Amino acid sequence: MRPVTIADRPTMQRYLTQFPQSVCELTFGNFLLWGESREHRWMEHEGHLLVSLKKQDGPQMWYQPIGPDPVKVMTDL
């Protein structure tokens, strides 16, 4: 897992374009602009984009996986 930077835009945008999301928080701009305060971290896993967040002293949480079979990824993890 690594922090979101502007250099990550092409990779993240590829997932977001190929697998459009209906949740307004799941955009590259949101991940980048709120990345520091929400501690956004991301990685690729089995053809999916995984993004986590953490608010202040709260637990690490995850957005839904972005890719062809998010339910499988959630079940496997």
Image (tube, rainbow, N blue to C red):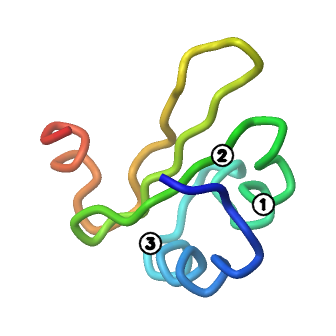
Mark 3 residue type: Phe
Determine the residue positioned at 43% across, 44% down.
64
Mark 3: which secondary structure?
loop
Label 2, label 3: how far apart the Cα atoms are = 20 Å
- Label 1, secondary structure: give it: helix
Alpha-carbon distance for marks 3 and 1? 19 Å
Label number found at residue 2: none
Q: Residue at x 44, y 72 (%)?
A: 19
Horizontal and vertical percent position of residue 70: 28, 52
Residue at numbered disc 3: 19
Q: Quadrant of the C terminus?
A: top left
User: Which residue in the structure is indicated by mark 1?
Assistant: 32
Measured from the top left, where is residue 16 in percent x and y?
54, 72
For marks 2 and 3 on the same chain, the one whose residue lies earlier in the sequence: 3
- Closer to the camera: disc 2 or disc 3? 2
Can you identify the residue that label 2 sits on?
40
**Residue drawn at point x = 61 percent, y = 87 percent:** 10
- Contact, CB < 8 Å: mark 1 with mark 2? yes
Vertical placement of 56 versus 9: above or below? Answer: above
* Residue 5 in the image: above or below residue 25: below
Query: In x, y percent, where is residue 66?
Result: 42, 60
Q: Residues within 10 Å of mark 3 (few under 14, many from 20)?
A: few
Which amino acid, by three-letter code, is at mark 2?
A: His
Residue 54 found in image quarter: top right
Q: Nearer the viewer, mark 3 or mark 1?
A: 1
Q: Residues within 10 Å of mark 1 (few under 14, many from 20)?
A: some
Q: Is residue 12 above or below residue 44?
A: below
